[in-house]
Amino acid sequence: MKILVTGANGYLGQGIVKEILNSGHDVIAVDFKTNNIDDRAKKIECNLFEIENPYEFFDKPDILLHLAWRDGFLHYASSHIEDLFKHYFFIKSLIESGIKQVAVLGSMHEIGFFEGPINENTPCNPITPYGIGKNALRELTQMLCKKNNVIFQWLRGFYIVGNLEFGNSIFSKIVLANKEGKEEFPFTMGQNQYDFIDYNCFVKQVAASICQSRINGIINICSGHPEKLADRVERFIKENNFNIKLKYGAFPDRPYDSKAIWGDNSKINKIMEESE
């Protein structure tokens, strides 16, 4: 299959593109820059929202994997709302031009404040511009796919653990702080429990999900179990033999973060079993 991947040069895109290529599919990798993308992909540097007919321009792909999104770690950035119509019209153009399958990377922040396991039927009550923007795009994309008989996949991402300084997660920031020789890292009390998934597992789950079309709809890209933030970060420091120590209580918990939240992994487990 020919798979169009937007935001392909980003932290997640790089690994996902590699996994798709390893599965034997062709990738059209699109971003403002393409310097970090696997050379096996067809790379295109552009502003995808300025392309008049993306389906024709990107050589009639079979599948869209839409990763592109600005300011993902700035949850109150106005860009999440400002860009929403651009994402909508880009996806709409591809669907109405003949693409067969659309997958978009979502976020557990679409759910809002919730405690317990999340499945595809869990109500969404987002409380940040990031969560509101993602949730609105999910509903719009699902509507477009249903209307045009296109396969719809919403890949709801959870907390990704990676040891690259390239990224904005707490783990990337710890890597960078350790590299800079810092002895302490300011931290919350770390008692909230989240669904953490290692970077390599995350990119494999995304690639496996879009390279099949039997299991669709909302798919949780997750580990399926909760763990205290403090425990996972301490373990991350130990796994990487860092000398840095956490300064507990330097920051308060964000008021909109759930105390314990994790993904129901039944759908992704079936996908991964069938992909082996």
Image (cartoon, helix red, strand yellow):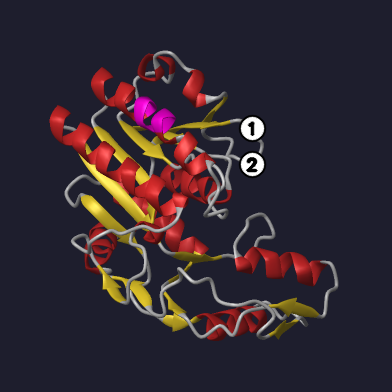
Viewer-closest of 180 and 201: 180
Quadrant where the C terminus is found in the figure: bottom left
Q: Position of residue 249 (x, y in %)?
A: 66, 84
Image quadrant holding the N terminus, namely top left
In the rendered image, the vertical position of residue 240 relative to residue 144, given as above or below: below
Identify the residue position indicated by label 1 in the image. 33
> Disc 1, disc 2: CB below 8 Å?
yes
Q: Residue at x 78, y 72 (%)?
A: 178
Q: Is residue 273 above or below residue 142?
A: below
- The residue shown at (25%, 53%) is 218
**Relative horizontal placement of residue 81, taking residue 261 as reference (left or right):** right
Is residue 1 in view from this perspective?
A: no
Q: Residue at x 54, y 86 (%)?
A: 231
- Which residue does the image show at 26% across and 35% down from the upper left? 101
- Quarter of the figure with residue 180: bottom right
Per the picture, the main secondary structure of the magenta-coloured stretch is helix
Image position of 11 with respect to 197: above or below: above
**Bounds of the magenta segment:** 85-90
Labelled disc at residue 36: 2
Q: Is residue 66 left or right of residue 239?
A: left
Q: Position of residue 175 (x, y in %)?
A: 71, 68
Disc 2 marks which amino acid? Asn
